[in-house]
Image (cartoon, rainbow, N blue to C red):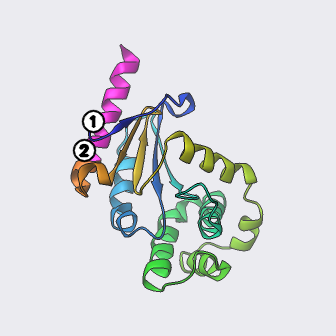
Amino acid sequence: MPYAEVPPVGEDARRCIAFFQFTCPHCRDLHPSLVRWGRSLPRGVGFEFMPVLSPSTTLDRGLVMAARAWYAVAQAVPARLDAFAERAYALVQDGRMSLEAGATWEAAARQAGVGDFARAWERVPVDRLQRAMEKLAAYRIQSTPSFAIAGRYMVTLDDTQGDAELFLRLASGLLSKAISSRSS
């Protein structure tokens, strides 16, 4: 099957999660399409981007800082998340700025028009990062971009051999399958 079933994550039954990393060129290329896909979901189905904190069992400081920056912007000015993502991808991938450098995230926030980023950074609750790590484990994320669909299914771009259109169609089909099974 070009997707995986996971043990149900009940709190995500009405949610789709897009797992990403700022170092992933595929995440960068697909980000605008994923945003559009998320906005097209039926009423009552939530969508969120979730940064991957670590692709392995060891905690990567740079990925933690990237996640913290993402959640700082989400908390301070959620309407600027897309602009922040665009700038962060560019700074990390084109500018070769370090994930571990606070200057990377400050620059991305400044360039995206996020005011008072430093204060938002300090206010990111530890449980936001913990929740992201728990989701990573629950869905067994091995690559990015990946979708968790309705707390039951996982699909990655790898599952579609890099075919972005098929990736999104498959995600839509899995969401439809989950919705129809709930209403039966």
182 over 156 or under it: above or below? above
Callout 2: SS: helix
Q: What residue would you read off at disc 1? A: 173
Residue 57 versus residue 99 in the image, above or below: above
Nearest the camera: 99 or 80? 99
Label the magenta part by its dominant secondary structure. Answer: helix
- Please report the bounds of the magenta region as a residue range: 168-184
Q: Is 124 included in the stretch rendered in magenta?
A: no
Foreground pick, 159 / 181: 159
Does the rendering let one see residue 116? no
Q: Residue furthest front?
A: 57
Determine whether, in the image, residue 112 is placed left or right of residue 27: right
Residue 124 locus on image (x, y percent): 72, 59
Under circle 1, the secondary element is: helix
User: Residue shown at 60%/80% (left/top)?
Assistant: 104
Query: Could you tell me the amino acid type at mark 1?
Result: Gly
| Residue 139 higher or lower than 64, as above or below | above
Which residue position is annotated with label 2?
169
Q: Circles 2 and 1: CB distance less than 8 Å?
A: yes
